[in-house]
Image: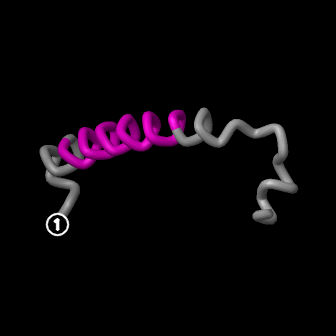
Amino acid sequence: MPRDALAYPTVDDALVWAIADHDVRVLRAECSALMKSIEAEGAVD
């Protein structure tokens, strides 16, 4: 049995993965928008 299974026996892995999968896309979009706004201001070389 994996060690993590013993540490978090009540964690629903599918639910955790779904949240992480959603959040990664959201964070990527937010970071991209932030980088574009910084570039537009000329702050990035």
Where 29 sits versus 38, above or below? above
Q: Nearer the viewer, residue 38 or 26?
A: 26
Q: Nearer the viewer, residue 7 or 2?
A: 2
Q: Is residue 20 magenta?
A: yes
Residue receiving disc 1: 45
Q: Residue at x 18, y 45 (%)?
A: 36
Q: Position of residue 22 (x, y in %)?
A: 43, 34
Give the quadrant of residue 21. Answer: top left
Give amino acid for label 1: Asp
The range drawn in magenta is: 18-36
Give the quadrant of residue 26. Answer: top left
Q: Nearer the viewer, residue 24 or 4?
A: 4
Q: Position of residue 24 (x, y in %)?
A: 42, 43
Q: Is residue 41 magenta?
A: no
Where 1 sits versus 25, above or below? below
* Residue 45 left/right relative to 15: left
Q: Residue at x 52, y 41 (%)?
A: 20
Dot 1 falls on a residue whose secondary structure is loop
* Residue 36 left/right relative to 20: left
Q: Position of residue 2 (x, y in %)?
A: 76, 64
Q: Main secondary structure of the magenta part?
A: helix
Quadrant in the picture for the N terminus: bottom right
* Residue 36 left/right relative to 18: left
* Residue 40 left/right relative to 13: left
Give the quadrant of residue 45. Answer: bottom left
Q: Nearer the viewer, residue 13 or 31?
A: 13
Q: Position of residue 40 (x, y in %)?
A: 13, 45
Display coloring: one colour
Q: Residue at x 79, y 54 (%)?
A: 5
Mark 1 nearby-residue class (10 Å; few <14, some 14–19, many ≥20): few
